[in-house]
Structures are given as structure tokens and as C-alpha cells.
Image: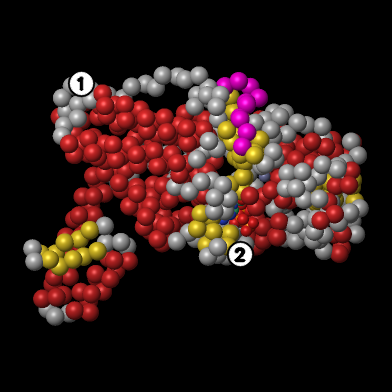
Amino acid sequence: MTQTPVPREPDQNIFLYDTMQRQKVRFIPGTPGRVGMYLCGPTVYSDAHLGHAKKEVAFDVVRRAFLHFGYQVRYVANITDVGHLQNDADDGEDKIAKRAALEQLEPMEVADKYFWSFVKDMDALNIMKPSINPRATGHITEQIRLIEELIERGHAYESQGSVYFDVRSWPEYGKLSGRRLEDQEEGTREAVREEKRDPRDFALWKRAEAGHIMRWDSPWGVGFPGWHIECSAMSLKYLGEGFDIHGGGLDLQFPHHEAEIAQSEAAGHAFARYWMHNNMLTIGGEKMSKSKGNFTTIQDVLSQHDAMVVRFLLVSSHYRSVTEFSEEAFESARNGYRRLTETLNELERRLPLAPAGNHSEVDAQIAAQRLAFDDALRDDFNTPKAVAALFGLTSVLNRALGAGDLPQGTLNAAREAYLDLGGSVLGLFADSGAPATGRDETEVVGALMDLVLKARQHYRLSKQYAQADELRDTLSKVGVTVEDTKDGVRWKR
Ligand SMILES: Nc1ncnc2c1ncn2[C@@H]1O[C@H](COP(=O)(O)OP(=O)(O)OP(=O)(O)O)[C@@H](O)[C@H]1O
Ligand SMILES: [Zn+2]
């Protein structure tokens, strides 16, 4: 029987690493008991890759942890469907428009196609849906208004139909990334530089050239918004002045987040009070990225691996650590995840038959692992330590289950600890609360393996050894080993 969780007082002892203050600090919400979070989402011009999954899972766990600790969370994650130009710079082609030309689609068709693909990936990875999922093209008015405020205050200027932020008018520009103005690159092409007062000024609004499809009327003529302004406009609109947490990947600190802060504060708005950045998922030591082409899409990964194993892999490293993508990492995630689910399955198998009562010693050990789990999360959402507590719980239970029958009260407490911590907080058991590698899949795999081994036996008997070996090698590539023993053929995953 599942008990309804007792509502808890919001926990006051949550510490997070604030990129702006460069240290771990106690989290104090702007409004008691509530958390407002904004996360920079994807630019929807291609399928999401595993790097995006790392970021989404990281912040999904932060959100789930706040819920666990008794907070209400408003989670705003945007979708960039205009204004993100090649090389993240402020000239060049719009990433979405470029893709539209390539696929012979309307830009909005491209954005929708990849938006829905993103939603499907996020659902598979058991990421909670954002409270609000605003799109840049739906907030052009708000962006224009913010640009007007900046011009009125003397921090932005119009030049030939485009509007730029005047970085020299805002000495704090650079405070998040620690870059001093004089060290910043002067990246832009000559023609655009001539429009700017300073080459480091960044675009708030761009004049649309003749062939540019995505265009809107504005006080400065027909054009489109710069990439950074959407996040300022939408986060302030939905979370309000001085909202709690702004998140995103480390790679966005400069220029994107730096620009967001400057343009919001220079317009007179209090911006995010805490900044959280996830580190990168790498491949061969390099950031996995769409534009570099070194990516594996989430769909590809999910065709090879159980979604919950992928999620387990991602939560097993800390959000501020690099996660290197490799087959070995999947292998060990698969094993680790199986250890958890096997014990949970065993608990569920024994529950209906168990005698009433409690085993106080095991109850105390379960409670201790729960505390360790919570402590880990309070310490900057330390998921590897939280996972270690789940393994601690697993060891306690395996020992106790091995020693004999456990009473129902204790089995229930253990099951609830798994579903609460592993399920609700780390999101590892999909929303049904049932482990993803439950009995059904085991039955299907068992039946398929019987078939494959029969075929292998047939090849061997008819001396078609190459085919028999090929079957075995293919199985070993997906982590299934086949052994010939004196009692017959055995296989294991
Ligand atoms: N390899 C990665 N690891 C972790 N987070 C990532 C990774 N790649 C992108 N992100 C994060 O995902 C969000 C969306 O990024 P974006 O759409 O720019 O992806 P990208 O692959 O870097 O694309 P591009 O190469 O076109 O810049 C950002 O917050 C970014 O930090
Ligand atoms: Zn953003």
C-alpha cells in the first residue's frame, strides 16, 4: 500500500554552486516555499543529442529535488526558434532558416518538426514537462519593448535598421564569466563592425535583408530579434523581477548569459539571483555539439539502450562534472541500474507473501540511507553521492533479504525509499513508478534468446560454424555472452 507523502516544510538547507558568486551558497527563495527556474532550451533546427540530454536531466533533477524538499516550482524552459545565427555570432545565417532551405520547408515547419522530436526525447527520458515552454517567435512584442527600454536608458542604439547593446555604457558587462571588456574578442565581420560603436557590442535587433524569411515589423524597420534578448524577455515575463535560478550549459556563460544579464539589468530589471551551469557531455574529450557534427542523437542512443539506463548514466556523474560518452560507460550504467531494479523487483515479489510487522534494525538502515541521499542532494545536487546512497540501500536490503524473510512493514519502507528517491527524485523508474526493466522485458528477451540459441545450435550441427560464430559475436556486441558448458548453452547479460 502506498502512503500519501506528508507535505513537508520547505527545506532551508539547500546549497548550490552559484556561478556568479563562484562558490556554493545557501539557496534562499525570493518567495518562501517557491522556486522560479529558467532554463535555456534548444535551438530547434535538428534532433537533440546526448549533450542536450545531460543538461535536461541535470536541471530536471534540480527541479525534482526542490519538489522533494517541499517547494513549489515554476519551471520555464524556452525554445529558440528565431535569431540564433551561425557560430552564435550576430551576423551570418539563421540556423533555422538555413535548415528550412535545405529541407525545403517553412522555417516554422522546421521549428515544429524538431520541437516535437525534442518533446518525444524528453518524454522518453522521463523529463518533467516545463510549467511554461515559451517560444521566441511568440514573444516578439516583449523583446521589442525591452529593446526600447534599453534605448531610452542610453544602453542601446539603432544603426541602419539594427539595434546594438552598447557594452561600454555598462561597466558590469563581463561579471558572470569574469571576462574584462578589453580581453573580449572582436569577432564580427567588417561590414557589421562598421554599424557598431564598439566591435564587442551585440545585436538586440537585426535588420532583415531582402532574402530573410523570418521578419517582423519594429520601430526600426523590418527585422528579427537577436538571440540573447528572447531569454531576458521571457524569463522576466514568466518569473518576474529577481527570479530565483537561471540555468544552462557552461558554454552559454559567454556571450549568451553575459548578454542576458547586461541587457536585463541595464533596462532596470533585477535579473536571476542564482546562476547554475552544467558541464559538458564530451566525446573524445571534446564537447558534443550540433555544429561540430560529433554528436549522437538521443534517438540513436535510445535505439541501443534502455532510456532509464541512459538517465542512470547521466545522473551517475555530477552536473558540474564532464561526462565522457563511451560504450564502457553504458556498460557500467547498465550493470548498476540492473542492481537497483533487481532488488526492487525482489521486494515487490516478496511483498504479498510477507508476514506483518517490522524489522527495526533494517528500518533504521533504510532511514539512514534516506538521510544520506537527502544530504547529497542538499550539497549542490550531488547525484553521484545520492546514487551511492541508493546502492547503500541496495546492499542493506540484499543482505537482509538473503538472511531470510522480511516483514511487510520493512519491505514497504524499502520499496517506498526506492520509488521516492530513485523514482520521484532521480526519475529513474519512469512515471508509473515501475522499474523499466521489469518482468515483461525479461520474458521477451528470454523468448528471443531461446530462438537465437536454437538457430545457433542448428548452424553448429550442420557445420556452418561461421554463421554460428557470427550470431555469438553479434550478441556479444549488445552485451550478451554465450557460454557452452557441459550442462548445455548458457547466456547472460
Ligand atoms: N555537449 C553538451 N553537454 C551538455 N550540454 C550541452 C551540450 N551541448 C549543448 N548543451 C546545452 O544545450 C543547450 C542548447 O544548446 P545548443 O542548441 O546551442 O546546442 P549545440 O549542440 O551546442 O548547438 P550548436 O553547436 O549549434 O551551438 C545549451 O544550454 C547548451 O549549453
Ligand atoms: Zn538563453
Which disc number belongs to residue 357?
1
- At 50% from the left and 19% from the top, the residue drawn is 9
Q: Is ligand 1 closer than 8 angstroms to the Cβ of mark 2?
A: yes
Q: Earlier in the sequence, mark 1 or mark 2?
A: 2
Total marks shown come to 2
Residue 401 found in image quarter: top left
Q: Quadrant of residue 36?
A: top right
Judge by depth and name the residue closer to the eye, 68 or 120. Answer: 68
The chosen color scheme is secondary structure
Image quadrant for the C terminus?
Answer: bottom left
- Residue 233 shown left or right of residue 438 in the figure: right
In the image, which disc is placed on residue 188?
A: none
Query: Can residue 168 be found in the magenta stretch?
Result: no
**Residue depicted at x 91% and y 53%:** 197
Q: Which residue is found at the position 30% from the left and 39% from the top?
A: 394
**Residue 260 in the image, given as x and y percentages of width and height:** 74, 42
**In this orientation, does residue 77 appear?**
yes
Instruction: Sort mark 2 into few (<14), some (14-19) or many (20+) by Cα contacts within 10 Å.
Output: few
Instruction: For marks 1 and 2, give the CA distance.
Output: 59 Å
Q: In the image, what residue type sits under mark 2?
A: Lys
Does dot 2 land on a helix, a strand or a loop? loop
In this view of the protein, which residue sits in the foreground, 200 or 75? 200
383 versus 86 height, above or below = above
Give the labeled residue for mark 2: 292
Is 299 placed left or right of 485 in the picture?
Answer: right
Which amino acid, by three-letter code, is at mark 1? Gly
Q: Residues within 10 Å of mark 1 (few under 14, many from 20)?
A: few
Asked if the residue at tag 2 contacts the one at tag 1, i.e. Cβ–Cβ closer than 8 Å, the answer is no
Determine the main secondary structure of the stretch shown in magenta: loop
Residue 288 in the image: state x and y as whole percent: 56, 59
Give the magenta part as a residue range: 24-33
| Residue 106 percent location from the top left of the image | 63, 55
